[in-house]
Amino acid sequence: MERPTFEGTLVSQPDDKLPLGRAAFLGLQHVLAMDVYIVPFIIASVLAFSIADSSAFIQSAFVAAGLATLIQSQVLMRLPIVQGPSYVPIGAILAIAFGAGGGIAGLSAVIGALIPGAILVALLGSPTKVFHRIVGRLVPPIVGGAIIIVVGIALMPVALKESVFAVHGAGTVGGNILLAAVTAFLLVSCMMAGIRMGAGGNWLRLSAVVIALVGGCVVASLMGQLSLQGMEDASWFTLPRIAFVNFDITFSVPAVLTMVLVYLVVLAESTGTWFAIGAVIDRPLTDDQLDRGATGEGLGCLVSALLCSTPVTGYSSNAGIIAITGVASRVAFAAAGILLVCFGLIGKLSALIASIPGPVIGGVFTVLCAVIAMNGFRVVRSVKLTERNMFVIGLPILMALFATLLPADYMKTLPNLAQYLLGSSIAFGAVWAILLNQILPVDKNNSEAETAH
């Protein structure tokens, strides 16, 4: 079966050049749509870091995300990818830190566990060329398409629950919904108006995310839900901690083994993002790209660990931004990486991003989730939907939602490994897609057609 013709409208391809100003503006949109500060904020809060340590930890996450983005998008995988802190390792990081005494001292054991695992992930790629064989055997088009759908759908309840329905400060659920709706409306309206205007409307489409975020922040300010106090209190310039230089590291074999397992889940999460980006730009991933991607992931996580931060992963939301703006040029992603580093070094800039209200981010995030999911449906539409294939596509969605909606109190009663797997609904759904495609019997009448595809 022939692969369907791509139905999106890209303004620029990955290798196209962009004017410096446009690249910076587009890179800023990618950065603004990310929630880089959330993971380090959660960890710092639970471990009761001091204000100074929390600030340094958050800024390290920005610098690590920027450097990892440059490594992956410009040097190794060379695809339009933005890296940021993964949510998957949070449980393991907290467990290791508390086991080492908690607080900032516990972070030394966490970093010691992160470094060896990152090196192992890097070795799975280009040095050994093992990773593409694993993917080629386990991830044919039907599984790849199912994983893309899982990425989009699994993120929807997270975006709604954490960014829209969660009430902070003087906000209300109704007010949050209004803010998210205004932001989403601005985003979709700008995108569709830009497309309808043709080439003359490209500027509107390219600016859609920033217009939506600014508009949402204006409404939030009118509602009394926007505060810039954090930016005013932040320092202008700080350097991140560096492992072995100004931060002591301790190693523990059980902690290292735990993080190796967690890294494999993070790698599965990133693979889902890579497939989503490949679908958006209509470029199937090559074996070489997969191997370089694994190496890039490992090196990015190693850099992050050396900067005393947490593992990074490809951010799925940015694939949605590519579909909305139509810009896949890696120049914009180089700009995003540089801006992330700048935000990490300049405290007031990172604090400014952190000041954007959650519902405003949620309004953009939910639309991006829908765009990602629909790109997955484009991929699987070319596969004949036999009863067997419907299970391969549909059940992983169910399992991803199961992991997302599983009550937190019940999850805490499960073994640690189960908690790590269920901690990433994307990785959990991806694993089910792979397993179902391996164990469900293939209809012999359709196997030849699917193989040809």
Image (cartoon, rainbow, N blue to C red):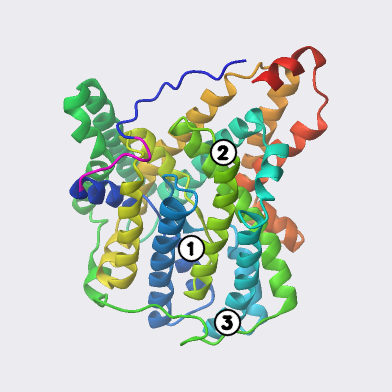
The residue stretch that appears in magenta:
13-19
Q: Tell me the residue that label 3 is attached to.
A: 108
Quarter location, residue 395: top right
Q: Tell me the residue that label 2 is attached to.
A: 286
Residue 200 appears anywhere in the view: yes
Choose the circle earlier in sequence order: 2 or 3. 3
Residue 423 appears anywhere in the view: no
Indicate whether 2 appears above or below 438. Answer: above
Looking at the rendering, in which quadrant would you find the N terminus? top right
Task: Please state which of the two labelled residues, at mark 2 or mark 3, is closer to the viewer.
Answer: 2
Quarter location, residue 15: top left
Quarter location, residue 350: bottom left
Q: Which mark is residue 39?
A: 1
Task: Tell me how far mark 2 sits from mark 1, CA to CA.
Answer: 31 Å
Kind of residue indicated by mark 3: Ser
Q: Nearer the viewer, residue 2 or 126?
A: 126
Task: Please state which of the two labelled residues, at mark 1 or mark 3, is closer to the viewer.
Answer: 3
Q: Name the residue rendered at 45%, 22% in the picture.
A: 6
SS of the residue under disc 3:
helix
